Image (tube, rainbow, N blue to C red):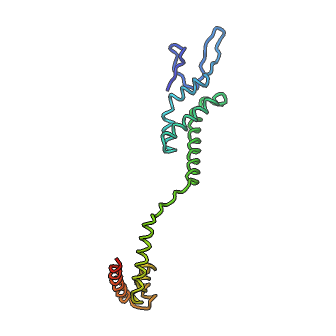
């Protein structure tokens, strides 16, 4: 965006980092913009674009605005040390990228070392009811004939397939199905008596 120096009536638009020439009676003397003018002009012309760049990098508009503000403050403080004022916008972009990387590194460290939330604890009542239910199932299981008890234990506690149960018990798959079905029916009857 072109910028006109306020005290030059009808002066041609100049780039923010261009050196202005003031003509006096003794000849031409170079007048370089001070940091306030240069950074203000850069800010007016490029702030939004730099915030968009930072927002893409840090995925948060508020943080992006802070990153860009910090970059402009650093640019203002170091304006006199700037080797090539024509590259001020490039320096600003690089500062925004570097500060965005720093924000992302900081986030990663915070997330890595954030305290882990404790899992919700069961209520005492729920624990007691669960224990009673488990005790009832174990008691019902012990009332079954040995083959039915073994088939159910291997199926539901051992999480074995019918073929694996058949090999473990030394019986056919059909016998496993039969023992499992009869055992489940008997367990239902026994558990209904407990309730």
Q: Residue at x 57, y 50 (%)?
A: 110
Q: From the viewer's perspective, is 117 left or right of 32?
A: left
Task: Please determine whether, in this image, residue 115 is positioned above or below residue 81.
Answer: below
Residue situated furthest top in the rendering: 25
Where is residue 29? Give x, y as percent.
Answer: 65, 15
> Residue 85, located in which quarter of the rendered image?
top right
* Numbered disc total: 0
Viewer-proximal residue among 55 and 15: 55
Where is residue 153? Give x, y as percent.
Answer: 43, 82
Viewer-proximal residue among 5 and 139: 139
Task: Please determine whether, in this image, residue 29 is positioned above or below residue 159.
Answer: above
Viewer-proximal residue among 12 and 130: 130
Where is residue 33? Give x, y as percent.
Answer: 60, 22
Q: Which image quarter is the C terminus in?
A: bottom left
Task: Please determine whether, in this image, residue 125 is positioned above or below residue 11.
Answer: below
Where is residue 145? Give x, y as percent.
Answer: 39, 89
Q: Residue at x 49, y 43 (%)?
A: 60
Q: Residue at x 54, y 26 (%)?
A: 41
> Residue 172, located in which quarter of the rendered image?
bottom left
């Amino acid at each position: 965006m072109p910028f006109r120096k306020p005290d030059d009536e009808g002066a041609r638009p100049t780039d923010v980092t261009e050196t202005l020439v003031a003509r006096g009676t003794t000849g031409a003397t170079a007048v370089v913009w001070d940091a306030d003018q240069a950074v203000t002009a850069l800010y007016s012309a490029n702030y939004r674009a730099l915030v968009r760049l930072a927002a893409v990098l840090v995925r948060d508009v508020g943080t992006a605005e802070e990153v860009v503000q910090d970059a402009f403050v650093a640019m203002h403080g170091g304006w006199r040390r700037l080797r090539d004022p024509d590259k001020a916008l490039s320096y600003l972009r690089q500062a925004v990228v570097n500060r965005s990387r720093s924000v992302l590194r900081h986030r990663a460290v915070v997330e890595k070392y954030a305290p882990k939330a404790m899992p919700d604890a069961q209520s005492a009542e729920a624990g007691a009811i669960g224990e009673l239910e488990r005790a009832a199932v174990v008691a019902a299981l012990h009332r079954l004939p040995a083959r039915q008890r073994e088939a159910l234990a291997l199926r539901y506690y051992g999480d074995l397939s019918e073929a694996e149960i058949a090999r473990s018990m030394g019986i056919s798959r059909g016998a496993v199905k039969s023992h499992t079905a009869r055992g489940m029916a008997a367990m239902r009857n026994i558990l209904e008596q407990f309730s």
